[in-house]
């Protein structure tokens, strides 16, 4: 395959050298197209040596070839890393004032952007509007990581490591399935692993008609199951009241209704799982008493029923304790999910960090919930907090995009 590697003018441009090497080592032909600003961070001879191809910047170079059209038509994919705020602004408005932007505007090949910039620039409304516009064009974004930035600052905006960009790009493009290739190894980083994933929302019965439940549709958990399968894992999905169809290529599917049923299903499968991802919204409480017949409404306002609640088991915490007591038989990686909204007391991330400490799992995915994000929506914003000191991952986009970012990040961290 012929891959154009676009390089924006940011300090993270040095990572493009390894990205060129990874694609070249896997047998792809690589063409480096830096911006003029990128050459202030990484030299043209370096890019030519690693790509084994000449490097041009301006549309007025190699004019007889109409170089931007040639590169655009011959490309099988265009991957830009780093994609700076300025470069994304130019692409979002359709400008074509250098070879890279002209190539992107001309190509019909898939375009993948890996943004990198300071946190304030990434979070600025103009940048976020440009990101939304680029997504609407069909461009795919690899979410920036959280970590050390230029100077002493840390935050969201760090360019992911080249290996992660490479793996995510291959997964998006569907490349690298040839047996035994380097690309196969990277594009299926979960090959051979057994994942147990929960999805959906539990329901706790009041009577034969009514129940206490939540708004979870199961979309994020199902997306995790599908992406994990695509990345080579054998997946056992435990679904509670799913509103979406589960993947057809699962290793096993178990359907449950209540928290108690989910707990039994999880522990039945625990010994056969290398990784557990508790993406389901498990009810914290259930009715203390179940009524065999429908609770009737009477005309007496003083006779309204009082529902007494009791705690449901904390499945995630029990999994962690099980591993502590059975270090040889427990899952190597445990990932929890927490839906948070924040309030006057703390932010969603502060609540998530406190919950991670209480639960003791390896990672906690803090799922920011709003009317357009989280439960039932097609898009999501998740921050993955590690138990140990390490970089946070912020994943945004469709639930499939979020699932892929989370799984690739966890795979990379656990294989180090």
Image (cartoon, rainbow, N blue to C red):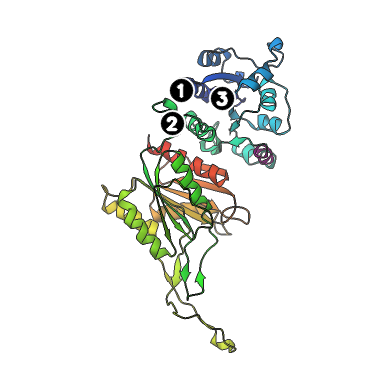
Local SS, label 2: helix
User: In the image, residue 51 lies at what x, y percent?
Assistant: 53, 16
Q: CA distance from mark 1 to mark 3?
A: 21 Å
Local SS, label 3: helix
Q: Which of labels 3 and 2 is toward the front?
A: 2
Determine the image quadrant of residue 153: top right
Residue at numbered disc 1? 26
Name the disc covering residue 139, or none: none
Q: Name the residue: 61% across, 55% down.
A: 370
Residue at numbered disc 2? 186
From the viewer's perspective, is 226 left or right of 321? right
Above or below 125: residue 51: above
- Region in magenta: 128-136
Residue at numbered disc 3? 13
Q: Are marks 3 and 2 in contact (CB under 8 Å)?
A: no
Dominant SS of magenta comes to helix
Q: Which of labels 1 and 3 is toward the front?
A: 1
From the viewer's perspective, is 216 left or right of 249? right
Q: Are marks 2 and 1 in contact (CB under 8 Å)?
A: yes
Q: CA distance from mark 3 to mark 2?
A: 22 Å
* Crowd around label 2: few <14 · some 14–19 · many ≥20 (10 Å): many
On whether residue 221 falls in the magenta region, the answer is: no
**Residue 313 visible, this angle:** no
């Amino acid at each position: 395959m012929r891959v154009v590697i676009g390089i924006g003018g940011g300090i993270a441009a040095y990572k493009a050298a390894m990205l060129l090497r990874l694609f070249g080592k896997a047998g792809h032909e690589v063409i480096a197209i830096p911006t003029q600003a990128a050459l202030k961070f990484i030299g043209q001879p370096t890019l030519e040596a690693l790509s084994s191809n000449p490097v041009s910047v301006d549309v007025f170079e190699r004019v007889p070839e109409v170089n931007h059209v040639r590169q655009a038509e011959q490309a099988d994919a265009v991957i830009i890393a780093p994609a700076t705020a300025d470069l994304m602004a130019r692409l979002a408005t359709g400008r074509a004032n250098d070879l890279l932007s002209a190539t992107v505007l001309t190509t019909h090949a898939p375009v993948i952007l890996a943004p990198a910039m300071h946190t304030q620039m990434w979070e600025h409304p103009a940048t976020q509007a440009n990101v939304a516009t680029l997504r609407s064009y069909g461009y795919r974004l690899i979410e920036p990581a959280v970590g050390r930035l230029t100077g002493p600052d840390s935050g969201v905006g760090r360019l992911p490591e080249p290996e992660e960009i490479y793996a995510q790009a291959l997964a998006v493009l569907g490349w690298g399935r040839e047996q035994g290739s380097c690309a196969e190894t990277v594009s299926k980083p979960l090959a051979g692993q057994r994942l147990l994933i929960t999805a959906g929302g539990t329901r706790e019965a009041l009577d034969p008609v009514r129940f206490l439940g939540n708004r979870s549709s199961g979309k994020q958990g199902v997306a995790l199951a599908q992406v994990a399968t695509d990345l080579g894992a054998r997946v056992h999905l435990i679904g509670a009241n799913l509103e979406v169809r589960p993947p057809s290529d699962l290793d096993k599917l178990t359907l449950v209704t209540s928290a108690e049923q989910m707990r039994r299903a999880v522990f039945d499968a625990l010994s056969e799982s290398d990784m557990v991802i508790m993406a389901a919204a498990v009810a914290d409480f259930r009715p203390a008493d179940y009524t065999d017949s429908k609770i009737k409404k009477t005309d007496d306002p003083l006779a309204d029923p009082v529902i007494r609640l009791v705690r449901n088991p904390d499945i995630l915490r029990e999994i962690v304790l099980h591993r502590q007591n059975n270090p040889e038989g427990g899952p190597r990686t445990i990932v929890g999910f927490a839906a948070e909204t924040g309030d006057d007391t703390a932010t969603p991330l502060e609540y998530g960090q406190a919950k991670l400490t209480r639960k003791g799992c390896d990672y906690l995915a803090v799922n920011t919930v709003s009317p357009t994000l989280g439960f039932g929506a097609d898009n999501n914003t998740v921050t993955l907090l590690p138990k140990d000191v390490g970089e946070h991952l912020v994943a945004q986009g469709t639930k499939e995009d979020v699932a892929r970012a989370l799984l690739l990040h966890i795979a990379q961290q656990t294989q180090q």
